[in-house]
Image (cartoon, grey):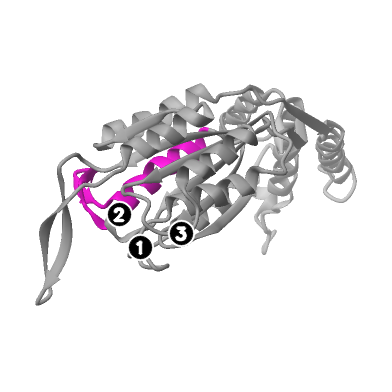
Amino acid sequence: MSFAHPYLLLLLLILPWVAWLKGRQGRAPAFVYSSVRILEGLTGARRSRAGQFLAALRWLGLAVLITALAQPQRTRSETTVRASGVDIVVALDLSGSMRAEDFELKGERVNRLTMAKHVLDGFIRNRPNDRIGLVAFATEAYTAAPLTLDHDFLQQNIDRLELGAIQDQSTAIGSGLSTAVNRLRDLESKSKIVVLMTDGQNNAGNIDPRVAAEAAAALGVKVYTIGVGTRGEAPVPVYFMGQKMYRQQPVDIDEDTLKAIADKTGGRYYRADNAERFQSIYEEIDRLEKTEAEVKKYTQYQELFGGFLGAGFGLLLLELLLQQTVWRRLP
């Protein structure tokens, strides 16, 4: 329930003050005696609480009337959102090299997958009207989430992605890209996009990444490629006798292939070598592929003014009837 004029509810604060003033003045006497001696013989007289009950009816009735003045309403809203026509599939590398902890997030060292999931979360939140899907790949590729507008469901599937969940000794970039393109193949979209993130080279699978790029270009799919990782060497965690240690691992990203994929499909290649750059890449992709969605919102108001008005006058009428009948005062 909402109120069309909520500021009028401030009048409720006046009622306790008025009641207090009226209580200080006292009530007019029912009888006036020249002397109280004529009442000395009366015993067991009790003070009636009828006046308190009647006063409560009066103040409650006035409170309900003030609430009616604020125009209470029951609101029912319905929002219709039409998808923007941009369909996006994110292809995310889950190979073992994504364990390298060469990023820093909120003051802590994190691995590449954690950083990728973090920036992907912000990207999804900024595009509520796009259908977005998810493909994960390492030695093989699979669809982790179909294209959907239910981004809560999508985020749950992203959160479930873990290193080691699939065979991760190698990287099948071509298979990952091909799987992502296949998810977009039969869709009639204003724009079809793949965001491919990897930190290695294609060394598995039966599909060459450049061939997959040609298929994407033929189907009108634009591919943005992101090379994940610092340049030179990256620290990879290892455990010895329960202690976490690091060994330096060469960073080996096939940038030439990633650039060729992007150029072939009309996309762009980016190198995410630090957390700030990683974040800015997704912000740039978001700007490049931004479209306006049509949103229609319908709001229905059910006026409750009459009910409150009737209840308020009903309470005042009840007070008047009881005052003139059951609890009538003399004279």
- Give the camera-side residue of 58 and 50: 58
Dot 1 and dot 2 residues touching (CB under 8 Å): yes
Residue 48, x across and y down, in percent = 71, 53
The residue carrying mark 1 is: 163
- Tell me, yes or no, if residue 28 can be seen here: no
Of the residues shown, which amino acid type is indicated by label 2?
Met
Residue 258 point in image, percent of width and height: 39, 38
Q: Quadrant of the N terminus?
A: top right
**Dot 2: few (<14), some (14–19), or many (≥20) neighbours within 10 Å?**
many
* Residue type indicated by callout 1: Leu
SS category of the residue bearing label 3: loop
Mark 2 lies on residue: 98
- Seen at 56% across and 29% down, the residue is 17
Q: Residue at x 14, y 70 (%)?
A: 239
How far apart are the alpha carbons under marks 3 and 1? 19 Å
Q: Nearer the viewer, residue 54 or 7?
A: 7
Residue 298's quadrant in the figure?
top right
